[in-house]
Amino acid sequence: MPIRLRRFIGTVLIIILVIVYALAAITFAELLLASAPVWVHLLYFFITGLLWVLPAMLIIKWMAGPKADHSP
């Protein structure tokens, strides 16, 4: 697959990931954390704010393509 196509698909996937993840995190917080103390909200949003990076890293790794073998 050409690298430009990989990057385009990866960019679209990351945009979709961020939108869906944010909506899911906010919906979950609204439904289950409404009566929780402030520190629970802070902890939840800190963790969920960092957690989206893991799937994004996999997408970015895929976008970069296979590693080139530079051995002689």
Image: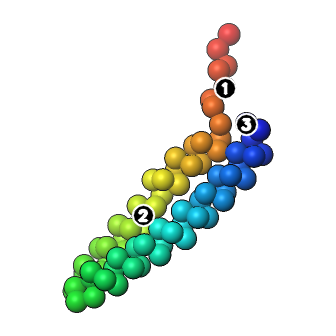
Kind of element beneath mark 1: loop
Q: Which residue is mark 1?
A: 68
Q: Residue at x 22, y 89 (%)?
A: 35
Q: Residue at x 63, y 31 (%)?
A: 66
Left or right of 59 on screen, residue 70: right
**Residue count near mark 2 (Cα–Cα under 10 Å), binned few <14, some 14–19, many ≥20:** few
* Amino acid identity at mark 2: Leu
Residue 38 appearing in the image: no
* Amino acid identity at mark 3: Met
Kind of element beneath mark 3: loop
Q: Nearer the viewer, residue 54 or 34?
A: 34
Spot occupied by residue 32 in the image (x, y as percentages of width and height): 27, 80
The numbered disc on residue 50 is: 2
Distance from disc 2 to disc 1, alpha carbons, whole Å, reads: 30 Å
Relative to residue 2, is residue 13 depicted above or below? below
Relative to residue 43, is residue 6 depicted above or below? above
Spot occupied by residue 42 in the image (x, y as percentages of width and height): 32, 78
The N terminus is located in which quarter?
A: top right
Upstream in sequence: badge 3 or badge 1: 3
Q: Which residue is mark 3?
A: 1
Distance from disc 3 to disc 2, alpha carbons, whole Å, reads: 30 Å
Spot occupied by residue 71 in the image (x, y as percentages of width and height): 64, 14
Kind of element beneath mark 2: helix
Judged by depth in the image, the label closer to the viewer, 3 or 1, is 3
Q: Nearer the viewer, residue 46 or 26?
A: 26
